[in-house]
Amino acid sequence: MSAAPLTTAPLTTAVLRASETGADRSLTRRLLRNPLGLTAIVLLGLIVLLSVLAPWIAPHDPNHVDLAVAFDPPSATHWLGADSAGRDVLSRLLTGGRLTLLGAAIGLTVAVVVGLVSGLVAGYYGGWFDTLSDLSTSLVMALPNMMILLAIRVVVGPSLWITMAVFGLLISPSIYRLVRSGVRQVRGELYVDAARVSGLSDARIIARHVLFVVRAPIIIQAAIIGGIAIAIQSGLEFLGLGDQTVPTWGVMLSEGFGNLYIAPLLILWPGLAIALTIGSLVLFGNALRDALEDKPAAPRLRGGVARQSTATATATATADDDVALSVRGLTVGYPTTSDALKTVIESVTFDVRRGEILGLVGESGSGKTQTAWSVLGLLPRGAVVESGAIVHDGVDLLADAGRTQRGLLGRRIAYVPQEPMSNLDPYFTVGHQLVAPMRKHLGLGRAEARDRATQLLAHVGIPDPVRTMKAYPHEISGGMAQRVLIAGAVSCDPDLIVADEPTTALDVTVQAEILDLLRSLQAERGLSMVLVTHNFGVVADLCDSVVVLRGGQVVEQGPAAALLSAPQHPYTRDLLAATLDGTAPRSVSDAAYAELEAAR
Amino acid sequence: MTDTLPSVENSHTVENLLTVENLVVEFPGRRRRAPFRALKGVSLDIAPGETLGLVGESGSGKTTLGRAILGLAPVTSGSITFEGRPLVGLGRAQRRAAGRDVQAVFQDPYTSLNPAMSIEDILTEPLTVQGVAGRDARARVRELLDAVGLPADAGARRPNEFSGGQRQRVAIARALALRPRLIVCDEPVSALDLSTQARVLDLFIDIQRRTGVAYLFVSHDLMVVRHISHRIAVLYRGEIVELGSGEQVTDAPEHPYTQRLLAASPVSDPHEQRLRREQRWAQAARAS
Amino acid sequence: MWSFIARRLAGGILLLVVASSLTYLLMNANSGGIALRILGDQATAEQIAAKEAELGLDRPVLERFGEWALGAVRGDLGTSWFTSEGVWHTVFSRLPVTLSLVVGTVVVTTIVATALGVLAATRRGRVDRVVQVLSVVGAAAPNFWIGLMLVVGFALTLRWFPATGFVSPAVSAAGWAASITLPIVALALGSVAAVTQQVRSAFIEVEGRDYVRTLRSRGLGERTVLFGHVLRGAATPALTVLALQFVGLLGGAVVVERVFALPGLGETIANATTSGDVPLVMGVVVVSVALVVVVNLVIDILAGWINPKARVS
C-alpha cells in the first residue's frame, strides 16, 4: 500500500516511445493474446460485474444483524459464514466491492481529470503555468499521502467519498508528469511541426497527435492508481478510521483483524478480494505495457559465438603471412520472434593486408556494421556467428567461444565508433576513460598512465590536453570527442583498428581533419584498418582497397583506385553514379531541360 | 515554360515571393546566461519558382532560418515578408492563415510522419483544415501520391511499412497538398541512402518544373545544394558570408569559409580527392 | 557542488514551509467542525462554543497560525489537546520506532532490489521471469495485508517472531531486530518490487548504450563494465524511484505499525486522528515532511555525485 506512484519513471520513457511505433489496432489483439493479460481482464470484468449487481444478487441485507449466527462458519444459508454481529459475509463482500470500487473510481477520476488537463496545458504551452504546476507537483509529491489523508479526516470526518477525492488530488502528479513529459516529447516531434505548418490549430493538434500518444500510458498508470486507491482506502478503514456504517472491504478487514483469534477466516475473504482486484489491475497494466512495447519472445540463444564448421576455412585463411586480418565465409544471424535466425550477413570474405586501410562500403542494411562488430566480437545480445572464420595475425578469433577475441580487444584490436558523443560514458571524466584500459593492458601506474594519456591527447590534436583530461564528455565538442575516442583506440598500441563510420556524425570541415588524423596515425604506426563507411569520398580519401556490400553479401572488391574508376558490378556503378560529385549546376540542367522541352 | 524559368540574371526583376530582412533570432539563455543568438541579421529573398540553397555546418543557424520562416522559431527582430504581406508579429490564428502558401519538408522521414496514422490520414490532414473533405479529399490524395511516384494503394498503409525514401515522398506529398508557393526543405535528403538521395532530389526538381513552386533548400552538403539550387547562400555562425549563383559559389567561391567548405568535401575520385586534400592543406598553411 | 547542495537545501526548506503552512490552514480553517468532531454529534452550540474558546479556536486563524509558526521555528510544535504533553516530546519519543522501520526498509530495498534487478537484467531467462512474478506480487499485495499474513504465518502459527511490540535497541539488539523483522518484510515487499523493476529496466537500457560497446572494445573486464559503468548509469533513475518509495513508506508505516502494534509515529497519528488532536496530527505531518525533505536532499546529493550533469541543472 505504498502510496508512491509505483513505476512512473520507466513508463514515461519506454512506453511513450513505444506507443508511437505500435499500430493500435493490433494492440488489443496483442493484449488479449497474452494469457496473463486475458486473465486479468476476465477477472476485473467479473469483479466489476458482481459488484455492480450486488444489490440484486446479494442473498441477505449486508447490514442485517443476527447475533444468533455470530461467527458461524460457512453454511447453506451463509455461504461464507457470518461476522461478529451475525451479518452475512458474502452479502457484505459483494456490497463492499461495490463501495470499494466506487471509492477507487472517484479517486481515479479526480486524478485523471486534474492530471490530464494540467499536464496538457503545462506540456503544450509551457510558460508560467508550467513553472507553477511543476512547483506544486513537487510539493504534493513530497507529502506522505497517508498522513495528509489522516489530517483531512480530522477536519471533515470519516467520509469515504471526500477521502478518495482528496487521494485523487494527491496522486494526480503521477498522471500530470506522465502527460506533461509525453506532450513535451510529442511537441518536439517533426510531425507536430508539420501539422502546425499545415495550419492545424492547437486544439486539433492536441486531439489528433498528443492525446493519442499519452492515451495508453494513462491507462497503464490508471490501473496502478486504481490499485493504490483500493490499498489506501482499505488501509484507512483497517485503522478504524473509515465510515463504519459503510461495509467496504477495508471495514470488513478491520473487523476481522479485531477478531483474529476467534475467527481467522474473517480476514481471509476481504483480504482475498483486495489482493485479487489489485493483482488483476497490476497484471492488466503490465500486459498493456508489454503489448505496447511489442516485446518479442526472449531470444533462446545467448549472445556470442556459435560456429558450426570452420576448420577448412581456417586452414586456407592462415596461409598468407602478409595478411593482418582474414575474414572467411562469415555468416551472422540475428534472433527473431520465432526460433529461426535471420541472416544479416552471408559468406562475407575479405583480407586486410598489414598496413592497409580497407573500406567496407554499402547502404543501410548492407551488413557493413555487422561485419565490423563480428570482427570485434561485439555483436548485440542474441546475435550469433553461424559459420565462417575471422583470423587475426594467424590466430583464430572465434576459437574457444570468443575468449581469444576478447583477450585481444583493446590491446591489439581497437574500435573507433560512429557517434562520438554517445560513445563516451557521461559519468566519467575523459581522463578516467583513457587511463583505465592503459593500466589494465600496459600495466602502467596511475601517474604514468595519466602522463601518457595527456601526451596522446596532445598528439591527436586536442589544444588543451590537461584540461580535457579533467573534462566530462558533455563539456567537449563532437569533433573533440571523436579525437578522444581515436586516442583511446590507439592508446594500447593496437595493430588493427576497426572504425565504424568514424566521420559520419561530423561536419565536413571536422571530417576532413579527422580523416587527416587517421591517415597520419596509420602511417606512423603502420596500422591495419577496417573503415566502415557509406561515403565514397571518404573511401577515395583514405582507403587502399574496398569491399562493396549489399544485403549482407559482398558485391565487389578490389583496390580502391581501380574499383572507383572502373567499377565492374552494375550495383557499384549505380552507387557511384548516384554520388553528386561533378554534378551539373542547376542553370546547366535547366537549360538542358528547356532545350528538351522546346524540341518536343 | 522556358521563359518563366527564373535565372540568376532576372530573378531580381521578378517580384520577390519571400523577403527576409535583417532577421535576428535569439533563444533564451539557461540560468541567467546571455541569450544565444542563432541568427545575426540575415537578409535574403526568393523569387517565384526559384530554389535558393542554404548551406552551412552545424550551429550555422540554417535550420533556425527555415523554422523562423515557417513560424516555428521566435523572431527577435527583422522582417519576413511573403508576397508583400508580413509573416512576423501575427497572432497564432493569423499566422496560420498567412502561412498557408509556405509548407515544409523536414529532415528525418522517420519522425516527420505520425507513425500511428495512415498515409491517407496524413495527407488529408492539411486538406481538412481548408475544408476539403470526403470524395474531393480522397481524389486529391490519389493525385498527390501519383505526383510523388507512390502507388495508389499506399494510402491505407502506415509509415512504418515504407522505406526512408518512400516516407520522404509522403512528406513531399503532404507539403504539396495545399498547392503552396514556397516549400522550406530542411535537409530533406541527408538521412537517405545515396541512391535514394539522388532520386528524391530529382523528384524535387521535377515537381518544381511542373508546379512552379519555390524552394528554400537547406543542406550541409555543397554538392546536393549545387544540384538543385539556382542561387546559394552560405551561412556561417548566424551570418550569410556569401550569396551567389550556384556555379559561382560551388565552382569559384569567394569567401574563405566557402573555400574551406568546398575543399573539405571529399569526392569519390582518388586522384581528384588527393588534389582537393593538398589544396586544403595549402589553404590551412596560408591561414596560419 | 556546494552551490548545488545549497540550492537543493533552500528548495527543501521552502517545501517544508509551504507544506506545513498549507496543512495548518487546511486543518484549522473550519474550527467549528473540529469542536464538533471532538464533542460528538449530540453537542449543543454552547458546548461547541465553550470548547472552541478552551482550545483558542475562537481567535482568527491567521493569528493562531502566526503563533504556531513562530513556535515551530523555535522547535515548539505546541501541546496535545488531550494529554497536554508537548507535541515535540511525543513525536521525538516515537520517532526511533518509525525510523528503524522505514530506514531498515530502505536499506533492505536498496540491497535486495539492486541484486535482483541486476540479476534479472544480466541473466534474463528464468531468473528474469521469477523476478517479474515477484514484482507483480509485490506491487499487488497491500503491505498491511502482507503484514497480516506474516503475523498469522510466522508469529501465530510458527512462533518464530514476536507478533507485536517493539524492543528498543538500547534494551536488546537481538530483541530489536526480532521485533522489526516482520514489519520490515511487510513494508519492503512493495518497494523491492518497484525498485527492482526500475533497476532492471534501467540496467538493460544502459547496457544497450553505445558507450558500453566502446568500453568493451577497450578490453575492460566484464565486471568493470557492468558494475563500474552500467550500474552507475542505471543508479540515477533507480534513486529517483527510491526517493518516491520513501514518501510512500512513511504512509505504509502507519498501517504496518498498527498490524504489529509498534508504538511509532504512525500509531500516534492514527490515534490522534481518531480523537481529533489537531496539534499532534500537525506535529507528525511536519516531522514527516521534514524527513522527506532530508531524504530527498541526500538522494539528490548522491545523484549529483554519480551524475556530473545533474550538478549543473
Image (cartoon, rainbow, N blue to C red):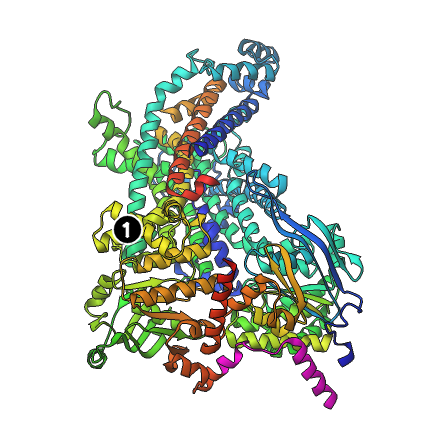
Residue range of the region highlighted in magenta in the rendering: A574-600
Residue shown at 20%/34% (left/top)?
A: C160
Image side of residue C106 versus residue B186, left or right = left
Q: Position of residue B184 (x, y in %)?
A: 66, 64
Q: Which quarter of the rendering shows the C terminus of chain A?
A: bottom right
Residue toward you, A76 or A473: A473
The answer to whether residue A216 is above or below residue B198 is above
Residue toward you, A85 or A336: A336
Farthest residue to the bottom: give it.
A599
Any magenta on residue A594?
yes
Is the magenta region chiefly helix, strand or loop? Answer: helix
Residue toward you, A400 or C216: C216
The answer to whether residue C174 is above or below residue C86 is below
Using the rendered image of the protein, determine whether residue A89 is visible from the camera's viewpoint: yes
Badge 1 element: helix
Q: Position of residue A20 (x, y in %)?
A: 52, 60
Q: Which residue is mark 1?
A: A436
- Residues packed near mark 1 inside 10 Å, few (<14), some (14 to 19) or many (20 plus): some
